[in-house]
């Protein structure tokens, strides 16, 4: 097994709001991967006194721990418990019902001797390479479908008919895109925060298969450099409009 990771803040020196962790439990045949992309809050976010890295470290750490310590429950249930525990850690000081209370997108993968289980919530992506070399992108495309329908996305955060992030409501875990496949049918997989997926989703220069091929051939750091070069060529987002001219970017490749 080979695991490679790279991460970079959108702005050098600024806090990176992505979180990534991989666990390979002793004695087991498999492991677990967690990638979160923290949502940058506006100044008014319910008087939360905590930073995005504070939130993602707690949520991501709890989710990774549960993923390996509780093989008896699904990843969605692990996420639900992790969200509840993280909310409890700041319920006493912060207004958690605010729509922009700290929150994150989630990719989680857990694999063992027989199965690979995955979970995707909001706009990070999981790429799965089959034994035949085919590449499948596992996406929670709610935001894309809302935009395609001409809807303003921001007011629909964590509301019925809208899109969902891991914030303070454990019930959101049931909205995640989940699945299981035989581990023998998977050659490799990769998790990308949306900042690392911009070659496909923003600039339109790449596809998922070429992205995974680049990860295999040159590694995650090269993918991040490629995205950063594309952003730097249009530093204000004049040619290719996008929410942030530069975004935190993280990529993890697991070759089984
Ligand atoms: Zn807080």
Image (tube, rainbow, N blue to C red):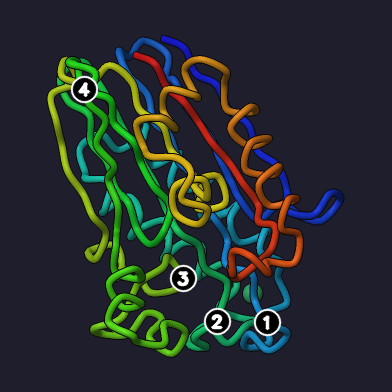
**Spatial distance from mark 4 to mark 3, Cα to Cα?**
32 Å
Residue 29 in the figure: left or right of residue 194: left
**Spatial distance from mark 3 to mark 1, Cα to Cα?**
15 Å
List the residue tagged with mark 4.
130
Query: Circle 1 — which element?
Result: loop
Q: Earlier in the sequence, mark 3 or mark 1?
A: 1
**Spatial distance from mark 2 to mark 1, Cα to Cα?**
8 Å
The C terminus is located in which quarter?
top left
Query: Foreground residue, 2 or 207?
Result: 207
Q: Earlier in the sequence, mark 2 or mark 4?
A: 2
List the residue tagged with mark 1.
42
Q: Give the foreground label among 2 and 4.
A: 4
Query: Foreground residue, 123 or 150?
Result: 150
Q: Earlier in the sequence, mark 2 or mark 3?
A: 2
Give how far across and how far down residue 42 sits, in percent. 68, 82
Give how far across and how far down residue 148 sits, in percent. 30, 75
Above or below for 43 versus 27: below
**Spatial distance from mark 4 to mark 1, Cα to Cα?**
40 Å
List the residue tagged with mark 2.
100
List the residue tagged with mark 3.
167
Q: Earlier in the sequence, mark 4 or mark 3?
A: 4
Point 16% across, 15% down: residue: 184
Query: Circle 4 — which element?
Result: strand
Point 50% across, 62% down: residue: 104
Asked whether the beta carbons under mark 2 and mark 1 sit within 8 Å of each other, the answer is yes
Query: Circle 2 — which element?
Result: loop
Per the rendering, the mark at residue 117 is none
Give how far across and how far down residue 33 sits, in percent. 43, 34
């Amino acid at each position: 097994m080979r695991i490679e990771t790279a991460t970079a803040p959108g702005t050098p020196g600024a806090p990176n709001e992505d979180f990534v962790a991989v666990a390979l439990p002793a004695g087991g045949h498999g492991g677990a991967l967690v990638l979160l992309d923290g949502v940058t809050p506006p100044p008014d976010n319910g008087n939360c006194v905590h930073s995005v890295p504070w939130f993602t470290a707690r949520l991501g750490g709890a989710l990774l721990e549960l993923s390996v310590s509780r093989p008896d429950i699904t990843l969605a249930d692990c996420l639900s418990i992790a969200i509840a525990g993280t909310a409890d850690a700041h319920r006493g000081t912060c207004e958690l019902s605010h729509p922009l209370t700290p929150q994150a997108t989630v990719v989680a993968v857990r694999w063992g001797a027989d199965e690979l289980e995955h979970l995707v919530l909001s706009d990070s992506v999981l790429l799965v390479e089959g034994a035949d070399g085919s590449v499948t992108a596992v996406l929670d495309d709610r935001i894309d479908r809302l935009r395609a329908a001409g809807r303003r996305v921001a007011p629909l955060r964590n509301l019925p008919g809208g899109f969902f992030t891991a914030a303070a409501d454990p019930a959101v875990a049931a909205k995640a895109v989940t699945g299981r496949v035989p581990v023998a049918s998977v050659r490799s997989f990769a998790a990308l925060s949306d900042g690392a997926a911009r070659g496909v989703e923003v600039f339109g220069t790449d596809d998922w298969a070429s992205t995974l091929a680049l990860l295999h051939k040159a590694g995650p750091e090269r993918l991040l450099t490629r995205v950063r070069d594309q952003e730097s060529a249009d530093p204000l987002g004049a040619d290719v409009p996008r929410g942030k001219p530069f975004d935190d970017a993280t990529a993890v490749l697991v070759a089984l």
